[in-house]
Image (tube, grey):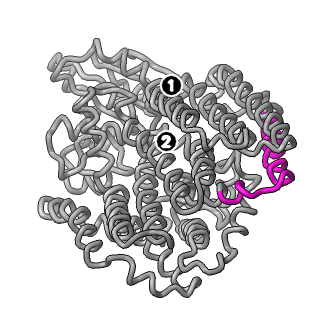
Amino acid sequence: MNDLYNSKKFVWGLLAVFTIVWLYVLGIRTLVPPDEGRYAEMAREMWANGDWITTRLNGIKYFEKPPLQTWMNALSFGLFGYGEWQARLWTGLCGLGGVIFTGYAASRVFSARAGFYAALVLGSSLFWVASGQIDSLDMSLSGMMTIALCGLVIAQHDGATPSEQRNWMLVCWAGMALAVLAKGLIGLVLPGAVLVLYSALSRDLAIWKRLHLGKGLLLFFAIATPWFVLVALKNPEQPHFFFIHEHWERFFLKTHHREGAWYYFLVMLIPGLMPWLGVAPQALLNGVKREQQAVFQPKLMLVIWVVFITFFFSYSSSKLPGYILPVFPAMAMLSAVYLENASRLQRTIAAGLLIVVGVAGLAAVPQMAHMAVRHPEERVLLEAYQPWVLTAAIIATAGGALALLHARQLRRDLSVLTLAIAGFLSVQLILTGFEPYGKMRAGKALAMKMLPELKPDTKIYSVATYEQSMTFYLKRTVILVDYWDEFTFGLRQQPELSIPTLDGFVAQWQQHSADNVKALAIISNEAYETLKAKGVTMRVVAEDTRRLVITNL
């Protein structure tokens, strides 16, 4: 049981099971807003209208992010039809590919056992697993940055031949270009800054001669440039919005109201690294130890990758949990190298911490129902979620206890495998059990009730709100009423695509009634009461705890 990594039959069998489960769960949950609904709908519209240059959301120009994920999702819809698993397929493949590539890179640069451990660590880390099951840009970016990171360390490790160095550096350059197409300039800025810091701290200035800058830059610009040129030619307003507003202002100004304390991402790493939090500090400290008689210092490169990216986003005025995701492949390799030579006590600490977290989860489950403060009527959904979280906590506790036993019996591979399985299963239970609550958040049930009321020319209004997932399930856009938010830039270019005031909507709604033309509207409870006070003619088609659907006839 101490040489599981040497059994090809076991490793390939484990990978097959992991892949099947990973891909299967992509389709068992509703697309939860805002991110999942937004990116699924953008791709649906792209495939429907055939415009692969100008990205749109709800028919309105939407340039907050580059198009890589929208392209991939649109292709998925074109090949397999519309649906939840199709919408998550690209991010699912990015997450799965990241696990496999990280394991491969660690095995090439360090050892076969380190590669086995690295794949286990990344494939069970809470944030990585959860993000790989969600249709969001964070995993798309992280998948491409994993290609860049792994290509770099394989190319630069001391055993690489000249042809391997060239080819893997080209892989690295391609990964950076795809990262730019996934989320913008950070796809180049972050790896570039890490490289500068590494060359300074390691005093390995010769690494710049090993980057194949000429071929690499040609490949980078060949991949990354065409869309930016084409979209700017079709939409002259795009460059300023994308490069100034979405990069400079988003990083330095608090315009997006996503501020957080300087330690925000350090706090996020605590749950995100589970079940490997117990080895993370030691792995980082182990990574700064210089390898004697080695030109390239891969562990130092990985430490700089983790620390700089964490610091970079900590300094930003815009903070969301998923921003930290690109550090996880590097953290997985560092943890794997550390676990390979960790003592029994050190592995015992890691297992013991998972037990503590599991027990804390068991204690917290009874308090979950009290989370429905703003929407007390949703308490029943949280109560239905409790058994899933309870089971996840039990598995975490039992997995930690079993790993503790294996650690005491000096079964290294089995202790690491047990922690990985416990972590992976716990995350899957937490995600799967969220479905009833997520389905309500998405408004899918309301969308299904709207479909019989619709004809191809029926107008749908969205009053003082925009339901990110409902438009995808309705497979049509809506007319925004008194709503701006993320559409502000696009509506300034195309103001005719919305009704800016509630009074303007009321006049049009009443005109539909006078003409005996049926229309529907998705509306918040507050806006419904306002219209009711105005004496507007309307009939409720469907409602839930967060919104209503009304018609004029």
Q: Residues within 10 Å of mark 2 (few under 14, many from 20)?
A: many
Residue drawn at (50%, 21%) of the image:
544
Q: Vertical placement of 101 versus 499: above or below?
A: below
The answer to whether residue 286 is magenta is: no
The answer to whether residue 344 is magenta is: yes
User: Mark 2 falls on what kind of element?
Assistant: helix
Left or right for 21, reference 303: left
Q: Give the labeled residue for mark 1.
A: 440
Left or right for 83, reference 371: left
Q: Which amino acid does the dot numbered 1 rest on?
A: Met
Residue drawn at (43%, 75%) of the image:
192
Q: Residues within 10 Å of mark 1 (few under 14, many from 20)?
A: some
Left or right for 101, reference 202: left
Q: Give the labeled residue for mark 2.
A: 132
Left or right for 493, reference 188: left
Residue 328 position, x and y percent, is 57, 55
Q: Magenta segment range?
A: 337-361
Disc ID at residue 352:
none
Q: Quadrant of the C terminus?
A: top left
* Residue 468 visible in the picture: no
Q: Which amino acid does the dot numbered 2 rest on?
A: Gly
Residue drawn at (19%, 52%) of the image:
54
